[in-house]
Image (cartoon, rainbow, N blue to C red):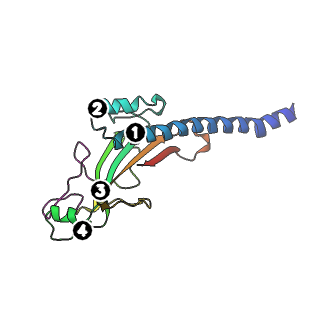
Amino acid sequence: MIEFALCMGLIWLPLFLGATQFGFNLIQSIQVTQVCRDSGHLYAYGINFAQSSNQYLLASFSPMLNIDPTGAGGSSVVILSTVQYVNQTECMAGGYGSTCPNINQIVFINQQVIGNAGLHSSVFGTPATDSYGNIPAGSPSTSGYLNAASALVSNYPNITLSSGAGGQQYGYIAELYSKSLGLQWFYPGSGWVNAVSFF
């Protein structure tokens, strides 16, 4: 009896709880990765997630992740961003002579947040946007992606964005952060399951 109790308490029970925790997080990780990719694809193809109907559509992809389209609660947040490279032509169109503060930089031109925005912010930056997620171009007298420091993208991977013969190139970023749905006994704080996709 003593050996059985020791084996159960010190070996089998922790193994069982660890396997349960791992299983919950594996299932959630697969769902987070898939929803992040699907939402990023739709966003890159022009779906406007500032519209509530599209936000509810996104939330229906995986009810288990508890994405609240109203933003009042929930345990997940999806952050979708459009970025572009600022060149001399962009600066001149904004009223600058030849250069502007954000020239030769990658900047946000749109960012839409679906779900509980208070849970997590983008690791690439949080620009000031209007109700549709747009960041205006800006000019010498107005703030926008040509001159605002908050519009600069940080931690962007080594992906070339430039303006060639085909015109301006855009990059699309999809981020999804979700609170861990597994048992929290093995975490000192709230665990996260997250994914990031680039298009």
Which label sits on residue 52? 2
Task: Give the amino acid type for the residue marked by disc 4 in the picture.
Answer: Pro
Determine the secondary structure under disc 2: helix
The disc, 1 or 2, on the residue closer to the chain's N-terminal end is 1
Q: In terms of image quadrants, where is residue 156?
A: bottom left
Distance CA(mark 2)–CA(mark 3): 34 Å
In the rendered image, residue 67, in percent from the top left (x then y), is placed at: 41, 34
In the rendered image, residue 175, in percent from the top left (x then y), is placed at: 42, 46
Give yes or no for contact between labels 2 and 4 (Cβ–Cβ under 8 Å). no
Residues in magenta, as a range: 128-146
Which residue matches tag 4? 101
**What secondary structure do most residues of the magenta stretch adopt?**
loop
The disc, 4 or 3, on the residue closer to the chain's N-terminal end is 4
Check the image and report above or below for 178 versus 167.
Answer: above
Distance CA(mark 4)–CA(mark 3): 25 Å
Task: Give the amino acid type for the residue marked by disc 1 in the picture.
Answer: Ser
Give yes or no for contact between labels 1 and 4 (Cβ–Cβ under 8 Å). no
Distance CA(mark 1)–CA(mark 2): 14 Å
The disc, 1 or 4, on the residue closer to the chain's N-terminal end is 1
Crowdedness near tag 3: few (<14), some (14–19) or many (≥20) residues, C-alpha within 10 Å: few
Task: Give the amino acid type for the residue marked by disc 3 in the picture.
Answer: Gly
Q: Is residue 183 visible?
A: no
Q: Would you say residue 68 sits in the magenta stretch?
A: no
Which residue matches tag 1? 39
Which residue matches tag 3? 166
The disc, 1 or 3, on the residue closer to the chain's N-terminal end is 1
Q: Residue furthest front?
A: 165
Does 135 sit left or right of 185 as displayed? left
